[in-house]
Amino acid sequence: MQALASQTPWFLAMVALIGFSGFFSSSEAALFSLSPLERRALASGNRAQRVAAQLLQSPDRLLTAILFWNLMINVTYFALASVVSLHLDREGETGLASAVSILALFSIIVLGEMLPKTMAVTLRNTFTTIIGLPLSLAVKIAGPLLPLFRTLHIMSLRVLWPKFQPEAYLTVDDLDRAVEQSTTDASLKESEQKVLHHLLDLSEIRIEELMQPRTRIQAYRPPISRQEVINDPPPDGYVMILEEDSEEVAGVIPLMRLAEVPEKHLERYIEKVLYLPWCALAADALEKMQIDRLSVTAVVNEFGETIGVLTLEDLLDTILGESPSRSQRLLKVAPIVPLGEDTWRVSGMANLRRIEEFFGLEKVSAKSKTVAGLMQELLGRLPEVDDESIWNGFRLTVLETDSKGGFTIQFDKLSPDLETETDGE
């Protein structure tokens, strides 16, 4: 025991090095296990969290600095362990020297690597707040050496793997073929296949095809009271609040949060909305809404005017719905209703994609995305009741209109003879 007591200063130094090793190991695990949403939240947190978010903006530099300090600490630790073992061996404590060497190895593995990393991944948000400032200082100290390490890394890649090429990303077509292939052996249920196909379809659908048109939005102008919303609740689950001096959407309040806000001046407690152009893809909108933790996107035209809104529920309905339909969501009616043989009642909000699928048509070459837009395009003006037009073997007749610009149109399948006669005219 006296031999061990004489090595106390070395043991204390080794304990300190285990602590430093645990710090850098936990820092690596905590920071690089954060999800995109958690990283986004860091940027708007306290000072330490903002510092951690800045470190993650240069992940290669951060990782190199962490590995550098961890290597230096571990080399120093094992050098001290060797010194202690040699001292004990010289004093005739050969067995004790061997035990110290083995214990030192297990201590650095368990206390300096495994335990800190496990705790850091489990409590990553707490750890990130704690390690932000000291880790930033460590990266700055190692800063002058980092360019050298990067140069050596690039040179080693060019020497060892001169023709190394990064693997190409999977395309949407690749994923679509993977889904098709997986369903051939019944590895996916039919419902799961539909969800996956709907999800992949978002990469081809513009948000204007899914949005709620401006004329269908129930909006409120400040000042707004809670009782005003209770007396006239919005059907889409969001209190859309306009800017004071324009018709643009300033923000929203989900109805589920209505009880949490004060009785008066609800406009002071709005959530931000995401602004995207009408031509943006639905998949991009979903990704941006998830990253920014927003529930509503305001869709603007080329002049910056709001022409509709897209909610997270609209996107989820498109993905998870058995037969997703904007008409069903907004008007509570089926987009296509059979009226008889070769006759259908179609909502003006029905998407032309759905019309193509339902009637087995080839891809429609039209600027419009909805039946109402198609009818207006065919007529060259706003449709009125009893207006007719011939399109793709169908006679389209406007049955009714409403004050919000909605249309109901009757589709009549033309007989081959009549279709030929019509084409000739």
Image (cartoon, rainbow, N blue to C red):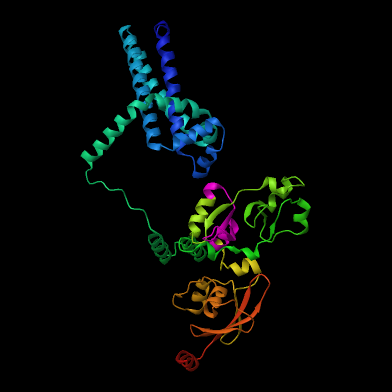
User: For this rendering, which residue is in front, 392 or 127?
Assistant: 392
Residue at horizontal 37 percent and vertical 21 percent from the top: 102
Regarding residue 281, the answer to whether it shows in the image is yes
User: For this rendering, which residue is in front, 243 or 49?
Assistant: 243
State left or right for residue 313 relative to residue 95: right
Image: 145 above or below 99: below
User: For this rendering, which residue is in front, 240 or 174?
Assistant: 240
State left or right for residue 261 relative to residue 96: right
Image location (x, y in percent) of residue 111: 45, 25
Q: Which residues are magenta?
A: 290-319
Image: 128 above or below 217: above
State left or right for residue 141 relative to residue 34: left
Q: Quadrant of residue 216?
A: bottom right
Image: 349 above or below 384: above
Image location (x, y in percent) of residue 110: 43, 27
- Is residue 302 within the magenta segment? yes
Image location (x, y in percent) of residue 219: 68, 58
Image location (x, y in percent) of residue 109: 40, 27
